[in-house]
Each structure stands twice: as C-alpha cells, then as structure tokens.
Amino acid sequence: MDVASIIKSSLYFLALINPISKVFLLSTMDPPYSQKQLFAIGLRSTLVALGILVALSIAGNFILSSIFHIQIYSLKIAGGFILFIVGLTAVRKGKFFEETDMQRVLDISVVPLAAPLIAGPGTITAAISFASLNGYSETILCISLALFVNFLVMIAAKQIGDILEKINITGPLVRITGLIVTAVAVQMILTGIQEWIHEIGS
C-alpha cells in the first residue's frame, strides 16, 4: 500500500464524514454534554458507523448488483445528489441539519450520529465504490483512519466549539465545509455519469 495514497483516501473519507458538522451538533446540545458523555457518545457512534461501513464495503457491491440489480455508477449519482443537498443546505443556511427534535433525543450516538451523519449516503457510496477499485483491506484502513480522526474531533467538540464561537468563525467555517462537500458531491455525480456513458458505449 502506498502511504501517500492511504493519506489522500483517508482525507477524502474524512471530508465526506465531515467532522465540523459533529462539532456543531455536539457543542450546541442543551443541556451540554460532559467530557465523559462526549467520549461515550463518540466511541459508540464511531464503532457503529465503522461496523456499517465495513459491512457495506465488503457486501455492498454484491447486495446492489445481485439483489437490487443496481450498478455502482447509479449509486454514485444518487448518493451525489443527496450529498449535494446536504452541502447546499450548509452553504445557504450555515448548518448541516434541521433543528427539529434533535435537541430532545436522549442518545444521539446511533441516530443521527452514526447514521446518517457519519455513515451517510456519500460515505456509504464512497466505501462501496472504493472497495471495488482498491480492495477491502485498503478501504477498511482508510475508513478506520478517517473515523479515528473524526472521533478525536467529537470528544473535543466542546472545546473546539467554544474556540470557534469566540472568534466568530462557526458560520463561515460551516459554509466553507459545505462548499467542499458540495464539490465532492458534484464530482461523485460526474464520475457516475462518466462510468454510465462508458458502459453504454462499450
């Protein structure tokens, strides 16, 4: 395995996981979480998301093609559109999620943190397609590294949130991250279309 390739791919998964959205969620809960609660929530959500992504990396291609008769390029296009909406919401509104009943959920570690905020459509699509191109071991390694960094960010969410609020950069940072997520979504859609054109032309 090429170390540079591993780092590059891990950063790609990290961009899809989007740690900033987790900081914003965890640091604005009322009442605020203690450090012990943040650690427990971060660990639980990370392990659940890892299980989901690893399972789909290994079996996702078989499930899609053999059971649902869906090609990878279709998943890329659909996942790209959903991810585009998430990114566009962040750019327009300065937040990655709608604040409805989120604050009243007692345990957010599985829903919405593990899924869909960590193991979301974009991350799942990338995991399945990446595994089909680069193999399971490299995919699982890159996902694990990205989730580990995201976990470190989550357990430090309160401190990071306080710093961002003090320098009034939360809104701009969310919008910049949203723009990056939107660009990743567009690239995912274009790649899916390119693969589709290649298949129908061959």
Image: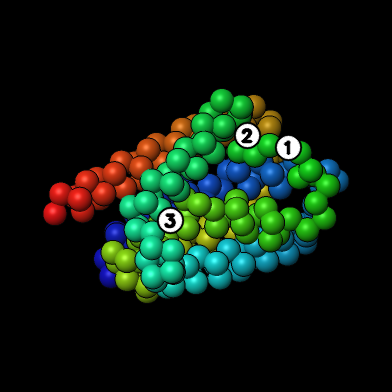
Comparing 186 with 139, the one in front is 186
Q: Residue at x 57, y 55 (%)?
A: 118
- Which secondary structure lies at badge 3? helix
What residue is shown with label 2?
95
Comparing 152 with 80, the one in front is 80
What residue is shown with label 1?
99
Which disc number belongs to residue 125? 3
- Which secondary structure lies at badge 2? loop
Q: Position of residue 43 (x, y in %)?
A: 66, 65
**Can the viewer see residue 104?**
yes
Q: Is residue 123 above or below residue 77?
A: below
From the viewer's perspective, tell me whether residue 153 is left or right of residue 202: right
Q: Are marks 2 and 1 in contact (CB under 8 Å)?
A: yes
Q: Residues within 10 Å of mark 1 (few under 14, many from 20)?
A: few
Q: Residue at x 50, y 65 (%)?
A: 53
Q: CA distance from mark 3 to mark 2?
A: 23 Å
Q: CA distance from mark 2 to mark 1?
A: 9 Å
